[in-house]
Image (cartoon, rainbow, N blue to C red):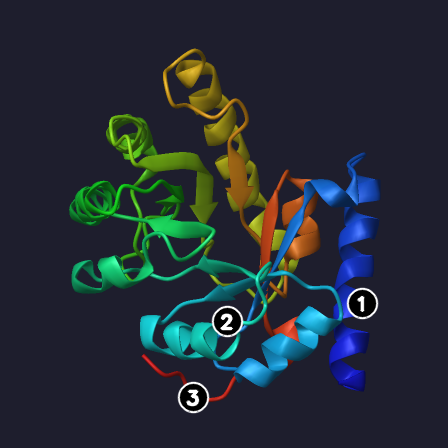
Amino acid sequence: MVELAANLEAVRAAIAAAAAAAGRRADEITLVAVSKGHPAEAVRAAYALGQRDFGENYVQEWQEKAAQLADLPDLRWHFLGHLQRNKIRHVIGHVALLHAADDMAGIDEMQRTAWSQNLQQDVLLQINLAEEAQKRGCGEEDAELFLDVLLRSPNLHLRGLMTLPPADEEPELTRVWFKRLRALRDRLQVRLRGRPGASTSLWLSMGMSGDFPVAIAEGATHVRVGTAIFGARTPKVR
């Protein structure tokens, strides 16, 4: 608990410092504590320290934690990973934000599921800026088409964009990808102005433990931080 408290305080301080350096307020940035691979007790401990937003990647692992932590009513779950179509029904309507709407078939299934349950689901469109074969998401040139599909999906609320830049040990080298996502967001924001269902300000989910201060400098509204808070992960449960 002592180590977790120190880690969380250090991350919050780094967010505040990065925001101030960029002329932003720290409360403009949502810290998503990535709890995948860590037990429910770690989430509960972080919750006791004031953390409310937590990110998971695997449906079974998230379901088990959600059941154990059901007594924490204002805990907000974020689903960060790719959702297989046969698992979408387990997640839609049960998380605050889906960070990875990443293909047309998945978006279609999300809409059908949300419609059948008469609910609204906030989503982010995942952009694969570097077009890495091992990563999901649409290419930059297809982003407007995907956004059009999401805006025509009445039960999905498009809140913004998400990206996973190429891995690099030097945080500064990720800046170019964060700049590109912000520039894409700005272009799309202009084109979407006045469109029914379009957010007036699209969010940017970008930046992780190694580079979130750089992401904040480039406009991140959501940063996904796991190792810097919880330490190394235990083996995943799918």
Query: In the figure, is residue 217 to the left or right of 149?
Result: right
Q: Residues within 10 Å of mark 3 (few under 14, many from 20)?
A: few
Residue at 31% in and 40% down: 139
> Where residue 171 appears, x then y in whole percent?
64, 58
> Where residue 7 appears, x then y in whole percent?
76, 74
Q: Nearer the viewer, residue 128 or 85?
A: 85
Residue at 59% in and 48% down: 222
Residue at 40% in and 83% down: 236
> Where residue 34 appears, x then y in whole percent?
55, 68
Tag 2 residue = 70
Q: Nearer the viewer, residue 51 or 36?
A: 51
Query: In the figure, is residue 97 to the left or right of 116?
Result: right
Tag 3 residue = 235
Tag 1 residue = 10
| Mark 1–mark 3 CB contact (< 8 Å) | no
Establish if 183 lies above or below 3: above
Tell me which numbered mark, 1 or 3, is placed earlier along the sequence.
Answer: 1
Measure the C-alpha gap from mark 1 to mark 2: 28 Å
Residue kind at label 2, given as amino acid type: Ala
- SS type, badge 2: loop
| Mark 1–mark 2 CB contact (< 8 Å) | no
- SS type, badge 1: helix
Labelled disc at residue 125: none
Establish if 45 lies above or below 200: below
**From where the camera sits, is residue 123 visible?**
yes
Measure the C-alpha gap from mark 1 to mark 3: 25 Å
Q: Quadrant of residue 148?
A: top left
- SS type, badge 3: loop
